[in-house]
Structure formats: C-alpha cells, structure tokens
Amino acid sequence: MAPLDHCEIRITCGSRDEAAAIADALVDGRLVACAHVAPIASVYEWEGEVQHDEEMLLTGVTRFERFHEAVELVT
C-alpha cells in the first residue's frame, strides 16, 4: 500500500459568497484540485450559551506539503 500524501481540508464560512471566494482562490492557487461547498447547521457553545447558525462548509483535498499554504491563504 502506498503512503498517503493527501489530506482533506474543511473550512466553515459565514456565507455562500465567502465560501465561493475562498474556493476560487484555493483552486486558482492550485492548492486544491477542486472544492465543494454545502450548507450546514452548526451548533456550538459561545460565551456560555449554546448557539445555532447556518453556515457553509467548504471542503477540498490537498497534498500534505501544500496544507500550510492553504491555511495561510485562508487566514
């Protein structure tokens, strides 16, 4: 079995437009081969209270050696 050289990245975005802009930049920069955007419902704790939000989930597959470049682009 060959060693794995790819990993999946997941990024939550506040809107479809934000997710599309990040996906375009990742694909254009050849940091992911393709990106997928899907609506999700997020439940989390913030300042001591349970929150519910609608977000967009952006996923893509990248090579391990490109992972940090993808993170830098997004942050």
Image (spheres, rainbow, N blue to C red):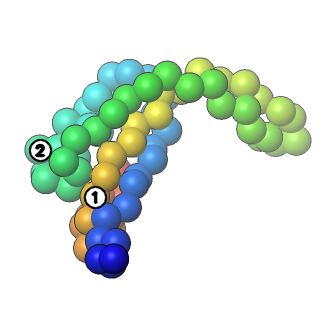
Q: Residue at x 19, y 36 (%)?
A: 24
Residue 25 appears in the rendering? no
The residue where tag 2 is placed is 28
Left or right: where does residue 22 sit relative to residue 48? left
Quarter of the picture containing the N terminus is: bottom left
Work out whether residue 22 can be spotted. Answer: yes
In the image as oriented, which residue stretches furthest toward the front?
1
Q: Position of residue 52 (x, y in %)?
A: 72, 25
Which of 44 and 33 lies nearest the eye of the viewer?
33
Dot 1 falls on a residue whose secondary structure is: strand
Please identify the quarter of the rendering in which residue 8 is found. Answer: bottom left
Q: Amino acid at mark 2?
A: Asp
**Where does residue 50 sit, x and y in percent of width and height?**
83, 33
Which secondary structure lies at badge 2?
helix
Q: Residue at x 65, y 31 (%)?
A: 42
> In the displayed structure, would residue 64 be above or below residue 62?
below
- Give the tally of numbered discs: 2
Q: Which residue is mark 1?
A: 62
The Cα atoms of the two marked residues, 2 and 1, are separated by 13 Å
Q: Horizontal placement of 41 versus 20: left or right?
A: right
